[in-house]
Image (cartoon, rainbow, N blue to C red):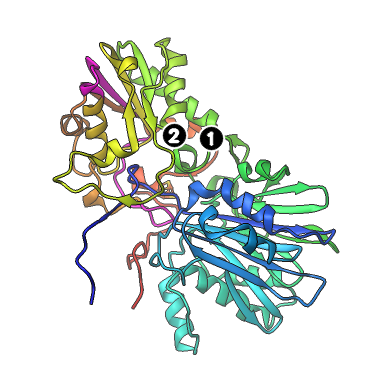
């Protein structure tokens, strides 16, 4: 019998979550790679904090694949003892936040499958929009699924296609002809490391190199963490296959014309780490630019510009540089709280926001403050932060948001929720200002998004409702466990 729930878990206060981080590595000199995957995943922790895993293979020995997965942060799931037991020169790793499929250990990745040619391990970032149909088709042909995630549909397709394909990369290519939506994949076959990015390029994927070791990673910050150099991005629609025999072999036959590419613009605004570069654009610089545009388009007289940590900080600096208003720190964030924590009860004096953020009274007391955040999703956090600044003595609080208002959900690997849960749905900016209690409120203008990423073609579906691919009829964003 279930015990009475005394404590409820509180979700992260940002209201929006990253999707997943993927990492792959192949040491052509045969050295053990598990510890490098561990450090790579630590650098990608911001992309997923529910579960993680590593699968290590040995291309030269008995071809045994050792896998370890678990719920929690990378440094909770892996101990030195566990890593020391994971021998092999090729590996894939994953950090997960669930945007489709529930948060359970079974759904942790990488997925490891035994198939006709050996063992296959797959790590996926993104959401397929046709996963339910493909899953039904596979189930009707006798497939038995171990998980409820769309990534298993991809793994199954690759394994099936491998029966008739000449190579593992050809099997990946054939699977790509069936799957639709957002995916950045890292696949470990018995002798090759394969990376693939969907033709729209929703999610990032890059290639790095350290001596004779090749790396695939969601973000460049993971390359730098393990001392690797950035080689290049995997292009939207590209498949790269990496092995000592061939080096890096590229298949670009599924790439779309550049203007049809549709990277998730929210990677630049919020998801990615500021020290990463995606498709040649610095995430940090794009946030500085967003702040500058806010200062140009929505100026206001004030004494101090502050950012809501972490992703609001660079935009706040940009606003300050453009406006000449001093930049300062107003918030101290408790960095030791994970993605979820025990929610304070209504009767408690603690508030969820205060558990995570504290205001520096000395910095804001008696000042007119401009506060920059990356987004307003439901609005429940913004009103509390505005109040905290006022309670600390700010005489005025002007909120600027470094993205346009969220008006539509996302189907491509983030958890922008259904329209009715979005504060901007059916409300004017003035109505939102009143709800959050700010003295003024302004968002980034929609037409600034493109300049923010230097003209790179991006998806902005959650702001415009115009998606690069038709959204699915069935809601794929929840758990389609049946
Ligand atoms: S709909 Fe929004 S969050 Fe989703 S991929 Fe497009 S830009 Fe990113």
User: Is residue 381 at least partly visible in the picture?
Assistant: yes
Q: Nearer the viewer, residue 407 or 96?
A: 96
User: Is residue 290 at least partly visible in the picture?
Assistant: no
Q: Which residues are magenta?
A: 389-415
Is 220 on the left-hand or right-hand side of 143? right
* Outermost residue, left side: 347
Quarter of image, res 281: top right
Q: Position of residue 393 (x, y in %)?
A: 23, 17
* Outermost residue, front side: 81
Q: Secondary structure at mark 1?
A: loop
Q: Quadrant of the C terminus?
A: bottom left
Q: Quadrant of the N terminus?
A: bottom left
Q: Position of residue 447 (x, y in %)?
A: 41, 32
Upstream in the sequence, badge 2 or badge 1? 1
- Badge 1 crowding class, 10 Å Cα cut-off, few under 14, some 14 to 19, many 20 or more, is many
- Badge 2 crowding class, 10 Å Cα cut-off, few under 14, some 14 to 19, many 20 or more, is many
Which label was assigned to residue 274? 1
Q: Nearer the viewer, residue 358 or 449?
A: 358
Q: Residue at x 70, y 71 (%)?
A: 189
Residue 303 higher or lower than 90, as above or below: above
Quarter of image, res 160: bottom right
Residue marked by disc 2: 311
Q: Is mark 1 within 8 Å of ligand 1?
A: no
Q: Position of residue 20 (x, y in %)?
A: 50, 55
Magenta-span inclusion, residue 423 = no
Asked if disc 2 and disc 1 are in contact, CB closer than 8 Å, the reply is: yes
Which label was assigned to residue 124? none
């Amino acid at each position: 019998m279930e015990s009475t729930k005394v404590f409820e878990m509180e979700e992260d206060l940002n209201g929006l979550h990253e999707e997943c981080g993927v990492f792959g590595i192949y040491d052509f000199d045969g050295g053990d790679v598990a510890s490098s995957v561990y450090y790579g995943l630590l650098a990608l922790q911001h992309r997923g904090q529910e579960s993680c895993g590593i699968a290590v293979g040995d291309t030269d020995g008995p071809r045994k694949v050792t896998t370890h997965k678990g719920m929690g942060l990378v440094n909770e799931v892996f101990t030195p003892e566990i890593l020391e037991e994971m021998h092999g020169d090729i590996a894939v790793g994953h950090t997960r936040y669930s945007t489709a499929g529930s948060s359970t250990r079974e759904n942790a990745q990488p997925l490891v499958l035994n198939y006709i040619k050996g063992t296959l391990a797959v790590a996926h970032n993104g959401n397929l929009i046709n996963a339910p149909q493909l899953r039904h088709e596979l189930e009707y042909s006798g497939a038995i699924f171990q998980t409820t995630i769309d990534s298993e549909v991809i793994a199954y397709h690759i394994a099936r296609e491998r029966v008739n394909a000449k190579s593992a990369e050809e099997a990946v290519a054939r699977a790509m002809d069936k799957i639709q939506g957002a995916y950045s994949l890292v696949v470990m076959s018995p002798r090759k490391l394969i990376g693939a990015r969907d033709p729209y390029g929703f999610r990032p994927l890059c290639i790095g190199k350290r001596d004779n070791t090749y790396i695939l990673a969601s973000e460049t910050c993971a390359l730098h963490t393990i001392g690797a150099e950035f080689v290049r991005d995997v292009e939207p629609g590209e498949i790269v296959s990496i092995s000592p025999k061939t080096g890096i072999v590229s298949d670009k036959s599924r790439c779309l014309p550049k203007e049809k590419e549709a990277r998730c613009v929210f990677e630049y605004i919020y998801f990615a780490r500021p020290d990463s570069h995606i498709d040649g654009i610095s995430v940090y610089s794009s946030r500085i630019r967003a702040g500058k545009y806010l200062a140009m388009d929505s100026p206001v007289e004030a004494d101090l510009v502050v950012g809501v940590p972490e992703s609001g900080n660079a935009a706040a600096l940009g606003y300050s540089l453009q406006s000449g208003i001093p930049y300062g720190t107003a918030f101290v964030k408790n960095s030791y709280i994970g993605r979820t924590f025990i929610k304070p009860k209504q009767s408690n004096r603690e508030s969820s926001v205060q558990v995570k953020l504290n205001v520096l009274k000395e910095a804001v007391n008696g000042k007119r403050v401009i506060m920059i955040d990356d987004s307003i999703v439901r609005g429940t956090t913004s009103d509390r932060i505005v109040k905290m600044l006022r309670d600390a003595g700010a005489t005025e609080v002007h909120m600027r948001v470094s993205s346009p208002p969220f008006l539509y959900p996302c189907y491509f690997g983030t958890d922008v929720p259904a329209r009715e849960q979005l504060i901007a749905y059916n409300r004017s900016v003035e109505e939102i200002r009143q709800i959050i209690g700010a003295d003024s409120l302004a968002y980034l203008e929609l037409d600034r998004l493109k300049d923010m990423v230097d003209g790179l073609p991006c998806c902005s579906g959650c702001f415009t409702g115009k998606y690069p691919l038709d959204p699915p009829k069935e809601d794929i964003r929840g758990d389609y466990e049946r």
